[in-house]
């Protein structure tokens, strides 16, 4: 029996069938490889175009010619850019991808998001500007009112009227600030500083919520600490009252 099987393996029929089977297997293997390569576009790639700045309405035709798809996954709001404009894309421009790849997009929203109005009252102008920027709001008109607190925020306006803290408004809105002018509107009687030294005059002025202005010493003065006021501007004789926070010039000899 083994002799017959050995003879069969050496026979022409077996060898012919074996060659046919091997060739068929090789052809089948190459056929499957070719089909997979064709199906997956093996080794083929295209460059992703830069579509940032385009509007979504133009993408359907633009990407169809390039065998690419798109999907909107997020939206932001940037001031000055049109609604529906593409802000970001993934994959990035010039990336190599296969045909049919989906590009994920972030577009500019049609309306800005809303934020709560912060409380700016009693903070300085610089602080107010920084806070507004943090909330995505803009600083508008500056309105000054008499108040000793110079450049302190006294009120906050939106569209010409007061706006309460916590009220929801669109990001990018313009907020007007009412600031103190550092002078105030309270009238103070002009004190008589005649005969006082500079230090004594400064003490009296501060006690009256007034400031010392320009100090003039006569040329002959040797000791400025002991020099005394012989003239002031304004004087009690020329002007009875002065705004709180105002300044008085002194002349000493």
Image: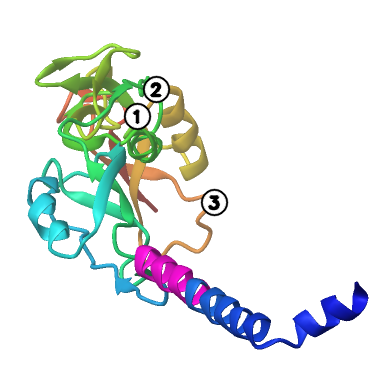
Q: Is residue 89 magenta?
A: no
Q: Is residue 14 above or below residue 90?
A: below
Q: Most prominent secondary structure in the magenta stretch?
A: helix
Q: Specify the segment rendered in magenta.
A: 29-41
Q: Is residue 79 visible?
A: yes
The answer to whether residue 168 is above or below residue 171 is: above
Q: Earlier in the sequence, mark 3 or mark 2?
A: 2
Q: CA distance from mark 1 to mark 3?
A: 35 Å
Which residue corresponds to mark 1?
Answer: 152
* Disc 1 element: loop
Mark 1 touches mark 2? (CB < 8 Å): yes
Locate residue 32, reporting x and y percent.
Answer: 47, 68
Q: Which of the two discs, 1 and 3, labels the residue nearer the N terminus?
A: 1
Which residue is the site of mark 3? 225
Where does label 2 land, which residue?
A: 122
- Distance between the Cα atoms at labels 1 and 2? 6 Å
Distance, label 3 to label 2, CA atoms, is 39 Å
């Amino acid at each position: 029996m083994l002799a017959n099987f050995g003879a069969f393996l050496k026979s022409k029929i077996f060898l012919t069938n074996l060659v046919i089977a091997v060739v068929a297997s090789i052809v089948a293997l190459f056929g499957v490889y070719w089909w997979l390569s064709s199906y997956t576009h093996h080794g083929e790639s295209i460059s992703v175009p830069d579509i940032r700045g385009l509007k979504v309405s133009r993408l359907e035709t633009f990407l169809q010619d390039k065998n690419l798809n798109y999907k909107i996954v997020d939206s932001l709001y940037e001031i000055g850019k049109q609604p529906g404009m593409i802000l970001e894309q993934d994959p990035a421009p010039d990336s190599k991808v296969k045909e049919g790849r989906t590009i994920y997009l972030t577009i500019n929203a049609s309306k800005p998001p809303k934020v709560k109005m912060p409380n700016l009252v009693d903070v300085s102008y610089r602080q107010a500007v920084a806070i507004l920027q943090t909330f995505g709001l803009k600083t508008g008109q500056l309105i000054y009112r008499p108040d000793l607190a110079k450049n302190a925020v006294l009120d906050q306006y939106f569209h010409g009227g007061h706006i309460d803290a916590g009220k929801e408004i669109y990001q990018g809105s313009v907020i007007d600030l009412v600031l103190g002018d550092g002078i105030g509107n309270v009238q103070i009687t002009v004190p008589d500083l005649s005969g006082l030294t500079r230090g004594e005059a400064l003490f009296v002025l501060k006690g009256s919520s007034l400031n010392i202005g320009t100090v003039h010493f006569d040329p002959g003065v040797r000791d400025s600490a002991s020099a005394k006021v012989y003239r002031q501007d304004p004087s009690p004789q020329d002007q009875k009252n002065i705004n709180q926070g105002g300044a008085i010039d002194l002349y000493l000899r």
